[in-house]
Image (cartoon, rainbow, N blue to C red):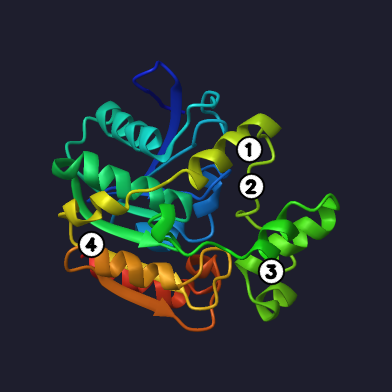
Amino acid sequence: MPYAMADDSTTVAYQVRGDGPAVMLLAGQANSHRWWDPVRDGLGAGRRTITLDWRGTGASGPTDRELTTRRLAGDVAAVLDDLRLERADLYGTSMGGRVAQWFAVDHPHRLGRLVLGCSTPGGAHAVERSLAVRRAMVQPDRRAARRTLLDLMYTPAWLAAHPGPTTVEGDPSMTPQARRDHLRASDGHDVWDHLPQVLAPTLVLHGADDALAPAVNATLLGERIPDARVEVLPGLRHAYFHEGEAVATPLVRDFLG
């Protein structure tokens, strides 16, 4: 497995499949590249897909208490450097969408097209999940907490037909400290003031019934990023890209061209 070297010498593991125009796929909080496994083939037909393991997940180096979404955007740039790629498209979901926002701000010349899925701008302007959802996710009963997470990701009908396990429940190899560092980085995200600087053509996707990152955030991103296109997908939750693959993947592929 290839590794890139971040600016602080942390190793960042990455994975490459296929040939063609490059698109980087950025996973959600506390997840490795496995997040994309169910949909990668569909997204990658005729393309070169690049994923990475966030710090603290998979084969990458450890996290630290200074972790931020902006620093993680630097790790994305380090992977492009290692691949000697000057430019790529970017598709980030959940925390990966937050990282992608910073990449678009800090590395505009390296970005072709941008897709932001189930993400938020962070900070005071974002609409956060409810207190009830937050409490349910951290309850001491691990089985109940897992069920809460799955209910936030997928509809009851989908879960009944697909008992799992799924690839979006978090990397089981993570340490408790790494999970806390990821949560701190995601919660500390705030790119609101910089979003008007995003120059890349942008598509914003969101499940209409997403309670983990309420769908109103898609509208906020669409209004803040110049000329962004917004698609809110009815009946889908946070893992819209998986359960709604038949709709979401063609939207992304058409947008990326």
Which one is in front, 221 or 169?
Answer: 221
Q: Amino acid at mark 4?
A: Ile
Q: Amino acid at mark 1?
A: Arg
Q: Which residue is mark 4?
A: 225
Compared to residue 217, the image places residue 101 above or below, namely above
- Of circles 3 and 4, the one toward us is 4
73 or 35: nearer the viewer = 73
In the rendering, at what x and y percent does residue 148 appear? Answer: 73, 63
Residue sticking out furthest to the front: 124
The residue labelled by disc 2 is: 170
Residue that carries the numbered disc 3 in the rendered image: 151
- Whole-Å distance between the Cαs marked 3 and 4? 30 Å
Q: Secondary structure at mark 2?
A: loop
Question: In the rendered structure, are the residues bearing label 1 and label 3 in contact, judged by CB atoms less than 8 Å apart?
Answer: no
Whole-number angstrom distance, CA of label 4 to CA of label 1: 30 Å
Q: Which mark is residue 179?
A: 1
Residue type at mark 2 is Gly
Packing grade of label 4 (10 A; few <14, some 14-19, many >=20) is many
